[in-house]
Amino acid sequence: MRWNSVQIAKTCLRTRMRDPKRNPDTPFLYVDISAIDRSLKVITSAPEILGVDAPSRARKEIREGDILVSTVRPNLNAVAVVPPYLDGQIASTGFCVLRPNKATIFGQYLFYFTTTPNFVGILSGKVRGAHYPAVSDGDVKEIELPLPTVSEQQRIVEILDQANALRKKRAEADAIAARILPALFYRMFGDPATNPKGWNIKPLSEFEAQVRYGLGQPPKASTTGVALIRATNISRGTISPINMIYVDPQDVPPGRNAFLKEDEVLVVRSGAYTGDIAQVTKEWEGCVAGYDLVITPGRYLTGEFVEAYLLMPFIQKGYFYNLKARAGQPHLNAAQVAATPFLDIPADLQVQFSEAVQSIRILRKQRGAAGENLEKAFAVMLHRAFTGDLTAKWRVEHMKELLAEMETQAKALECPPTKVNPPEIGSKRHAGHDMYNKAALAAYITDRCHAPDRPMGRVKLAKLFYLVQQKSEIELTETFMKRAAGPLDDEIHKFLSLAQKSKWLVLLRGEGDLKPVKPGRNVSKAIKQAEKLLGPAKAKVDEMLDQMKWWGYRALERWATVLDASFELTAAGQPATVENVKDVIQKHPEWVPKLNRDEFSDTHIETALKGLRGFGFITNQD
C-alpha cells in the first residue's frame, strides 16, 4: 500500500486573527517565539498581558491542539502544540497556526512531521529577506506530507510518543542538574535581589571589565575556518555547535577585535533571545562573535562568575527585562551592559566558585554526549516514521481495514469541512473561505463604492476586497497571493461569477483596461449577509469605503501592497519603514517591477505608511 502525499493546507481547518487591543481591559495569555523550548518542542511560558498592552505582533487566535510553527529564521525549529490552558488565547504573527482536521489527520502526527529535519530543511529553502529572513504561512501550508490513514498515523504516534518520553525524562534530569549551579551561587553569595550578605554593589565597568560589539554583517561563510558564534548558538550558559557557521579568519575585518578569548562572556544583544549568556571556554577560543556583545571580565572578575551572575533571575527578569521593555524590539547595547550592577565579591571566593563550575561542566558534557546519542536515535526513528518503515509490519497485518479507511479519508480530502451551505452561514468566523460570503462582501463593496459617472473596475474591487478584510479582520481569505497588481484572492473570478449568477453584481464588458462592475438587482440580499459578516466593524469599514471610493486603482494597489509588506515585517519583528517595505517588495519577483514606477517612490510609500497608520491598519509599534 502506498501512502498519499498532500499539501498540509488540505489537512487543516481555517484559523482566525484577533486584535486584543479591541478589548483593552481584558487580560489574555500571549505566546511568542521565545516561549518555545526548541529542543522539547513545548510552550514553556505565556505571560498574561492586558489588551491595551498587546504588542502589534499579538494577532493570531489559538485553540487547544493547534500546532504553532515559527516562520522566522533562525527559529524555524520552534514548534509546539497548544495545551488546553491556552485555548482561545493569542500567539504572535511570527507563527503559522496549523489546526488539524480530525477527519484527515491525527494532530500529533502532523506535529511530529513539523519537527523533522526534512520539514525544517524545506522551510529553510523558502526563506526570503536579507535583514529579516522569514517564510509565509502559505510557504508552510504548501509543503507536502506523507498521509497514511488516521489509524496508521495513531500507531506511528504511539511509537514516537514512547521514544519521546525518554527524551523528556532526560530533559527533566538535565533540568534538575541545571539547578545545581544557581543553588551553589545562592549559597556562596546570596540572592542578588536582596543581597543578604551585604556585598558592595557597583557597575560592571568599575571592575575594569570591557564590553565590545561583535561583528554585524558576517564575512562570507566558509566550509572551514573558525566558528562564527551567533545568538542561535548561545543558550543558558552553553555554546552549541548546531547550525554553526564558519568563516575564514582572513575575511574577518581587522581592527574589530572580533576574535574571542577564553574567559570572555557573550551576551545576545537583540531579538527573541536578548540577554542570553554564555562564557567562552577553551574550545571556543579564537572563534568570532556574531551580532552579540562580548564582555572581557578583567582582573577583578572571573568568567564563570560573570556568566552565572548575569543568568540570575535578578538580572534576566529584572535589570535586562526592564531595559528590553523600553524598546519596540528587545535590544541591549554595550553601555547598558557595562552599567549592570554587580556584587563586589572577593577574588578568592570567585575562584572557588569557578573551580566548582568547571567540575559541573565536565559532568554536563558527559550528560550532553549521552543526550546526543538519544537525539540521533530519535531522529532515525522520525525518518523511518514518515517513510513507512516504522509501521510496515503493522500495516500488513491491518491491510483490509486500512484500505476501507483510505477511501473515507480520500473523500474527506475532496470535501473540506469548512464548506457549508449559505443559509447556515451567519457568524463572522464560520464564513471561512466560502464563496457565498466572498461574493456577498464583493457585492457590498461594489454597492457602497458605485458611482454611475465613475464606474469601478475589478482591479479596484480586488484591492478594496483585501483592505476591507484587513480592516474588519473577518479572514474570509486565508492567503492573499502576491500577484503583480498587489495582494490578490486567486478565487476572485469564482466568487464574482457566483455574485453575477445570484444577480448581486453585473460584470460589464471591458472598456479598454477597465473591466467595470456594478450592483445587481438582488444586491440587497448580499448587503444583509455582508453586514452579518462585518458585525461591529461595519461602521469603520463604511467610513473607509466612503473615502476610498474616489481613489484610483493604482493608489489602492500601493496601499494594499505596502500594508501586506508591513504584515510580513511585523511577523519578522521589524518596523514598517520605507526601506524595509522596499526590501520586502524586492524579495518577491512579482512585485519587483513596482519599484520602477513613480507610484512606489519613497515619498509615495511614506505617504501610504502614514495613511495606513491613520486608518489604524498599522500601529506605531509596527
Image (cartoon, rainbow, N blue to C red):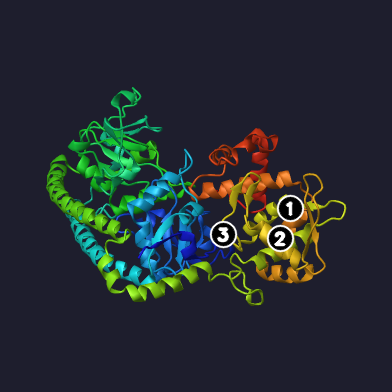
**Would you say residue 344 is visible in this rendering?**
no
Disc 3 versus disc 1: nearer the observer: 1
Crowd rating for badge 3 (residues with CA inside 10 Å; few <14, some 14–19, many 20+): some
Query: Residue 607 vs residue 515: left or right?
Result: left
Give, as a three-letter code, the residue at label 3.
Glu
User: Which residue is rendered at x = 66% and y = 47% of the image?
Assistant: 559
Earlier sequence position, callout 3 versus callout 1: 1
Q: Alpha carbon of mark 3 to alpha carbon of mark 1: how far?
A: 20 Å
Earlier sequence position, callout 2 versus callout 1: 1
Q: In this picture, is 315 found above or below 89?
A: above
Q: Secondary structure at mark 2?
A: helix
Give, as a three-letter code, the residue at label 2.
Leu
Q: Which mark is residue 472?
A: none
User: Which residue is rendered at x = 48% and y = 51% of the image?
Assistant: 139
Q: Secondary structure at mark 3?
A: loop
Residue 423 at x, y percent in the picture: 66, 77
Q: Alpha carbon of mark 3 to alpha carbon of mark 2: how far?
A: 18 Å
Q: Which residue is mark 1?
A: 458
Q: Between 451 and 58, which is closer to the camera in this rendering?
A: 451
Disc 3 versus disc 2: nearer the observer: 2
- Labels 2 & 1 near each other (Cβ < 8 A): yes
Q: Which residue is mark 3?
A: 478
Quadrant of image for the N terminus: bottom left
Q: Alpha carbon of mark 2 to alpha carbon of mark 1: how far?
A: 9 Å
Residue 176 at x, y percent in the picture: 20, 60
Earlier sequence position, callout 3 versus callout 2: 3
Q: Which residue is mark 2?
A: 496
Q: Between 406 and 493, which is closer to the camera in this rendering?
A: 406
Q: Between 602 and 564, which is closer to the camera in this rendering?
A: 564
**Would you say residue 572 is visible in this rendering?**
yes
